[in-house]
Image (cartoon, grey):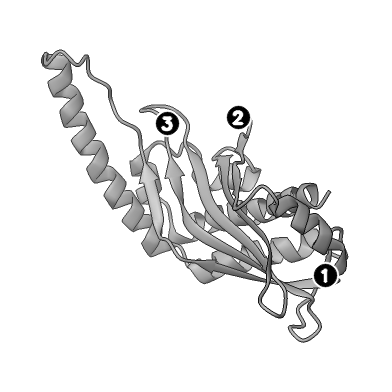
Amino acid sequence: MKHALLWTAALATAGCHAKFKKYAPTLGSVRTQVIVTGGPTVDLGEMEGSGTGDLGDAVAAVVNVVQAVKEVDLARRIADAVDVRQVNDAMEQSLADTLGSGPPFAWTADEKSAGALLQVEVLSYGLQVPGIGLPGVFTYELRTRIYKPDGERVYSARTECSVDAGDPKAVSVALGAVNNARQIKEMSDEDIQAAFDSVAAYCGQELVRKMRKHAG
């Protein structure tokens, strides 16, 4: 299965890129912080009826109620299995490894020597299936901000990272056909954790790629 990436970034103002291009080369090194402020969300898709009030509409209504119950149960299963601190660590390590010594700036673990704070806020994470029977994707909704030591914000972007469950390979091994809710319920906590860790690390790499692009 080929992987698909969907990236959308909404910048606060038209001048955000220009400001970031100006400051990025002067930051020297940054420290990173990943925080999760939203829980898992699950969308397993719905069945569409004919809209004429016939038997097909009745069947679709029943199916969609069942899907909604599955979504709640699956979100709870993910929440119980995933240690968000471990997911944070996976993304932060990915950011550190990918940034390295730059560009557009280097990474450091030393808070005192850091020229800025790169903060990634995970607004939500979870699983989305566009339609019943279709392949699912993991989704991470992220808000990335960079602050100078004096508190001035020099970068802000809101980004959605979507990755097919079949790629990277580690996720494929962990989840397989993710539109099968029963399969995920029967997975071990370790397998679910490994899947979300892998995607978090992958999204961390892509965040750095986008920042490099924004920095010009």
Which callout, 3 or 2, points to the residue nearer the camera? Answer: 3
| Residue of label 1 | 27
- Count of labels in the image: 3
Estimate the spatial distance between the alpha carbons at disc 2 and disc 1, rounded to whole Å.
40 Å
Which callout, 2 or 1, points to the residue nearer the camera? Answer: 1
Residue 204 vertical position relative to residue 63 in the rendered view, above or below:
below
Residue in the foreground of this view, choosing between 96 and 12 = 12
Say what secondary structure mark 2 lies in: loop
User: Who comes first in sequence, dot 2 or dot 1?
Assistant: 2
| Residue of label 3 | 130
Q: In the shown orientation, is residue 175 left or right of residue 15?
A: left
- Mark 2 crowdedness (10 Å alpha carbons): few <14, some 14-19, many ≥20: few
- Mark 3 crowdedness (10 Å alpha carbons): few <14, some 14-19, many ≥20: some
User: Who comes first in sequence, dot 3 or dot 1?
Assistant: 1
Say what secondary structure mark 1 lies in: loop
Q: In the shown orientation, is residue 82 left or right of residue 34?
A: left
Q: Quadrant of residue 62?
A: top left
User: Who comes first in sequence, dot 3 or dot 2?
Assistant: 2
| Residue of label 2 | 1
Query: Which corner quadrant holds the N terminus?
Result: top right
Three-letter residue code for mark 1: Leu
Q: In the shown orientation, is residue 163 left or right of residue 59?
A: right
Point 43% across, 27% down: residue: 134
Residue in the foreground of this view, choosing between 49 and 212 = 212
Q: Which mark is residue 210?
A: none
Give the image location of residue 33, x and y in percent.
63, 71
Do the residues bearing badges 3 and 2 touch, measured as CB atoms within 8 Å? no
Point 35% across, 37% down: residue: 44
Give the image location of residue 66, x and y in percent.
21, 37
Three-letter residue code for mark 2: Met
Which callout, 3 or 1, points to the residue nearer the camera? Answer: 1
Give the image location of residue 53, x and y in percent.
11, 16
